[in-house]
Amino acid sequence: MGRAPCCDKANVKKGPWSPEEDAKLKSYIEKHGTGGNWIALPQKIGLKRCGKSCRLRWLNYLRPNLKHGGFSEEEDNIICSLYVSIGSRWSVIAAQLPGRTDNDIKNYWNTRLKKKLLGKHRREPRNRGNYNSVKQEIDVNRGSSNDGDSSSLSLLQENGNTTQQQQQPCWPQNINNMPVLPLQVPLPYTNQGPCFNDQDSIKKLLIKLGGRFSGDYYHPTLDGLNLEFSSDGQQIYQEQVHVGSSSAAAACISSTINNNNEVQFAQTDQYSGVHNLVQGQGGNFTPSFEEMVSSSNYPDGLEFLYNEDMIDHRIIESPTTTVTATITTNWGETSTPLYHHHNSIASNYQSQGVTQECALQYFSYPGAQ
DNA sequence: AACTGGGACAACCGCGATATA
DNA sequence: TTATATCGCGGTTGTCCCAGT
């Protein structure tokens, strides 16, 4: 049996709200509140509207202290940071912007901000196997888009070094604009604007917001990138690598280094906290994991922020041990913010007896050897 | 002036989560 | 425990407006 409709569809008005309807709804809610029942509310007021429609109208338009339009640069940055960090959770993003609604932000993102970020990069569907062809296309489009549209890419390109832009992923050169990385460690830079680049702040915020971001949403042992000692004495560090679509990603990959310098990878369901080893014999990944990674999505419209090599299976040989396999970011250049980020992580390892070079090698900085 | 395409925004729809009987 | 009602969210669609042809 299907769910009963929330209202009589045939007897309900749709489309734009009239000023009279707005006034009725607003004045009733201001006097009596919603009564905790949106479905019953329109009948009480005498509106031929669905309760859901009333709720939406109130939340997105009639509610006091709402702002419309005129997003500031600061708000842009917050939206971008949070989008890269948590994906299209508009309600969470909206909670960071007083007076803004999730619908407003969603519309703003879809119609303006995404385009502002992407500039005029129109790309064919991603060819996962050929990063160079994608990069070439971006480069070509960059060339053709150089038509004086100074707003394009302004958030992503703060310096004018075209060659570098062509060779590097489109991270902001100005680290104050740098999107949050999906790693729960303090980033190695300061942010003079709102502290949304600080992972702790975001996490606290999310926990505060409750729901699936409550404290137990993340498995406790994945709570940050730390070196710690497990109960059996193994030295462990962990990095979360989110896979799957931004909204549906319920799994992350944690890596563990034991005292023999062997790395193991486990998939952890963030909801259940269940660990599953994703490596089989000889360090190969299990087929299900391979499939999961190969079918990974990226936040809509921001695929280009994720270098083709960001998810990469490889074998790293070191003089003393074979690190069986890893998932690595591979930005390459040591001038990038990500390098500094990794360098900071590496420093953490160092204090725990893992050489910085080894840790950086983990992140595939060849020069770190 | 008429048409067209695209941008911007409001509103709707469907579904999962949660509450409640 | 289960079925049903409601809420809340994110994706999508509809509509209006404006600039370009």
Image (cartoon, coloured by chain):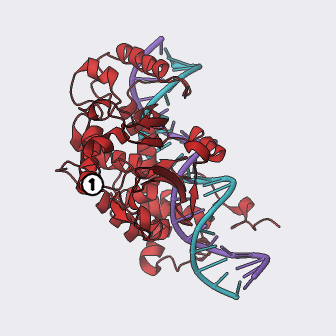
Chain colours: A red, B cyan, C purple
Examine the rendered structure and indicate whether residue A249 appears above or below residue A115: below
The image position of residue A33, as x and y in percent, is 46, 78
Q: Closest to the observer: A363 or A352? A: A352
Q: Residues within 10 Å of mark 1 (few under 14, many from 20)?
A: few
**On the rendered structure, is A197 left or right of A266?**
left
Give the residue drawn at x 47%, y 58%: A19
Give the residue drawn at x 26%, y 45%: A356
Among all residues in the image, which is located at the extreme front?
A320
Examine the rendered structure and indicate whether residue A20 appears above or below residue B2: below
Q: Closest to the observer: A56 or A272? A: A272
Give the residue drawn at x 45%, y 45%: A107
Among all residues in the image, which is located at the extreme right?
A1
Picture quarter with the N terminus of chain A: bottom right
Give the residue drawn at x 41%, y 67%: A230
Q: Closest to the observer: A356 or A249? A: A356
Q: Quadrant of residue A214?
A: bottom left
The number of numbered discs placed on residues in the rendered structure image is: 1
Residue A48 visible in the current orientation: yes
The image position of residue A171, as x and y in percent, is 31, 35
The image position of residue A310, as x and y in percent, is 44, 36
> Residue under circle 1?
A353
**On the rendered structure, is A269 left or right of A164?**
right
Q: Secondary structure at mark 1?
A: loop
Examine the rendered structure and indicate whether residue A228 appears above or below residue B19: above
- Identity, as a three-letter code, of the amino acid under mark 1: Gly
Picture quarter with the C terminus of chain A: top left
> Circle 1 marks a residue in which chain?
A
